[in-house]
Image (cartoon, rainbow, N blue to C red):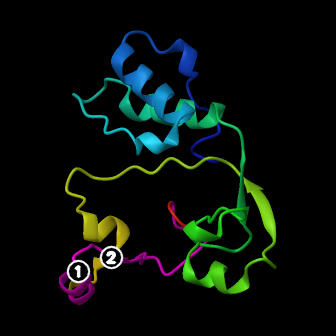
């Protein structure tokens, strides 16, 4: 049985009004950039995030892309998908919930900074990487 098959309903979560509002606002407008949810053990942090993800509609992604690139937006595609554009095949995928440990740092989450480029261009560039090497069973890339 999949661990996410039996998820507590979002509407049944009592209290935590600020957290629920933040999650809903981020679902409405993803340009907010995400929600950092923190609190004591047992305060429905993960439950709320998983329950909301279950309510969200499926999204179109490039078939076989470990990053889940949007097939309609070439600018945000990874280098592999950009090479194939516009001949990419799209499939629907459920919204993903990514849980990070409190010790997660930027380089562990999005990849290493390209320091030489940063120094020359005076802007930050990141080289994307995932430690799973695209394994389908990985919770982020699968």
* Residue 16 visible in the picture: no
Q: In this picture, is 33 found above or below 103?
A: above
Confirm whether the magenta stretch covers residue 119: yes
* Residue at point 51%, 60% (across, down): 139
Residue 21 placed where, x, y %? 43, 20
Residue 29 placed where, x, y %? 52, 36
Q: What number is the disc on residue 108?
A: none
Q: In this picture, is 142 found above or below 22?
A: below
10 Å crowding of disc 1: few (<14), some (14-19), many (20+)? few
Ranked by sequence position, the earlier of labels 1 and 2 is 1
Residue 66 quadrant: bottom right
* Residue at point 56%, 82% (across, down): 79
> Position of 41 compared to 64: left or right?
left
Mark 1 = which residue?
118
Q: In this picture, is 88 found above or below 56?
A: below
> Position of 126 compared to 88: left or right?
left
Residue 28 quadrant: top right
Q: How far, Cα to Cα, is label 1 from label 2?
A: 6 Å
* Residue at point 64%, 73% (across, down): 65
62, 123: nearer the viewer: 123
Q: What element carries label 2?
A: loop
Q: Is the Cβ of the residue at disc 1 closer than 8 Å to that at disc 2?
A: yes
* Residue 138 visible in the picture: yes
Mark 2 = which residue?
125
Q: What element carries label 1?
A: helix
105, 26: nearer the viewer: 26
Task: Identify the image quadrant of the C terminus.
Answer: bottom right
60, 114: nearer the viewer: 114
* Residue at point 55%, 77% (across, down): 134
Which region shows up in magenta? 116-139
46, 79: nearer the viewer: 79
Secondary structure mostly taken by the magenta-highlighted segment of the chain? loop
């Amino acid at each position: 049985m999949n661990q996410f098959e039996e998820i507590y309903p979002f509407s049944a979560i009592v209290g935590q009004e600020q957290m629920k509002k933040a999650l809903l606002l981020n679902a409405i407008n993803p340009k907010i950039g995400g929600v950092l949810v923190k609190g004591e053990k047992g305060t429905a942090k993960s439950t709320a995030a998983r329950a909301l993800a279950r309510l969200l509609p499926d999204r179109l992604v490039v078939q076989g892309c470990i990053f889940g690139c949007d097939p309609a937006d070439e600018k945000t595609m990874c280098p592999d998908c950009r090479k194939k554009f516009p001949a990419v095949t799209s499939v629907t995928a459920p919204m993903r919930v990514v849980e990070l440990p409190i010790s997660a740092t930027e380089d562990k989450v999005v990849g290493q900074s390209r320091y030489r480029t940063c120094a020359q261009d005076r802007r930050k560039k990141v080289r994307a990487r995932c430690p799973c090497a695209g394994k389908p069973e990985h919770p982020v890339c699968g």
